[in-house]
Amino acid sequence: MSTTPPSPMVAGPRKAIVKALLWSRVVWLALRCHRSPRRAAQALQALLAERARHRLGVTLKYARAGGRYFWDFYSPGWPSPAFDRFVERELDRLLPQHGAPHGLQTAIVAVTKRCPLRCEHCCEWQALNQQETLSREDLLQIVAQLAERGVAQILLSGGEPLQRFDDVVAIVAAAAGETDFWLLSSGHGLTAERAAQLRSAGLTGIALSLDHHDPESHDRFRRFPGAFAGVERAAASARGAGLLVALSLCPTRAFVSEENLAAYARVARQLGAAFVQILEPQAVGHYAGQDVALSAAQRRLLEEFCIRLNFDPARRELPAVAYAGFSRRRTGCHGAGERYLYVDTDGALLPCPFCREPAGSVLAEGLDAPLAALRARGCPAQARDPQAAGPR
């Protein structure tokens, strides 16, 4: 691996200044949103209480890329209109004033069925490399509806979204500014030229799938020779273009150990990643019908890893960790239109990439009716097992 790049994490006096400025903006937004110092103070107290409730899953780290600062993988960067929109919606959620349903914050949109990899855990396995359903115009229409709803962050996935590179550039360029865009990718096909083009269109960052610190093990999991080297090249290209880099890890039973997690953190630092997203294996897609769930002991190891990287001052140069399963078990599911949703490669509205029960078609019906149905139904997994989302 080449020379380790500068860490994107912000530390020392600079972190204190960034934190003060960012929270000053949050205070100003509370005043703008609620029009009253008393109500603004109540909303801010509610926001701090909510962050305290999520504390073990909320990092205290800040990362910098493209002239902006990021305090969470699932939040837009500051300063930006997307950040302002995100914060105002959270303030309104915690102290409602308009009587309208809670605003969406994040959407994951699968833009293609094409992918050269054959990943062990692929949740889109049944659709993989089938004929495309969505045209560029369809995708632009879907994203426009989400942007009109005020969605502050859109993550473009697939398949491999780089397989429709020109369409991705068009999608990002059409709505960037008010919305932060991320690419969820294997990294295959991301050159320095393409990264610069995506950054110019308005892309915020790229989350690269990396499922092992060992190149051979990652290649075997992805069933694609050279997949690990592709991640290395893609991370370097993204950093060079000023894009934020994150890694997405699916930790299997065979992977979860103290040694593997420590080695993974070192590789993430060497790649210049700001965040690591942990997505537990689910029995859907290529894993359908298989017993792939982690044990309670393995989940505890992952949770301890999350806490160490997010709060230990000795690890300040390592990336922050976003662990959805950890948060879900403590505070409930945020999918199914509560805070985020998923649009699949046919334009169907789903609770998340792992709950494959559509609520309707965004193309055929628009967003309103399927979203209402999604919210009324809630998270199917939580409905089947209410204890799954609660504290253990």
Image (cartoon, rainbow, N blue to C red):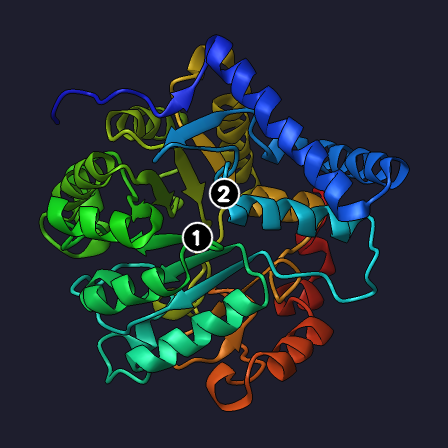
Question: From this viewpoint, is residue 274 visible?
Answer: yes
Read off the residue under disc 2: 80
Q: Position of residue 240 (x, y in %)?
A: 19, 35
- C-alpha gap between disc 2 and disc 1: 7 Å
Could you tell whether 177 is left or right of 236 in the image?
right
Q: Position of residue 255 (x, y in %)?
A: 35, 39
Q: Residue at x 31, y 85 (%)?
A: 133
Which label number is shown at residue 177?
Answer: 1
The residue lying toward the viewer, choosing from 43 and 387, is 43
> Would you identify the image quadrant in which residue 45 lies?
top right
> Would you identify the image quadrant in which residue 68 lies?
top left
Q: Residue at x 51, y 22 (%)?
A: 308
Q: Position of residue 277 (x, y in %)?
A: 43, 42
Q: Residues within 10 Å of mark 1 (few under 14, many from 20)?
A: some
Q: Residue at x 63, y 49 (%)?
A: 328
Q: Position of residue 299 (x, y in %)?
A: 53, 39
Q: What amino acid type is highlighted by mark number 1?
A: Gly
Quadrant the C terminus occupies: top right
Quadrant the N terminus occupies: top left
* Label 2: which secondary element: loop
Could you tell whether 205 is left or right of 63 in the image?
left
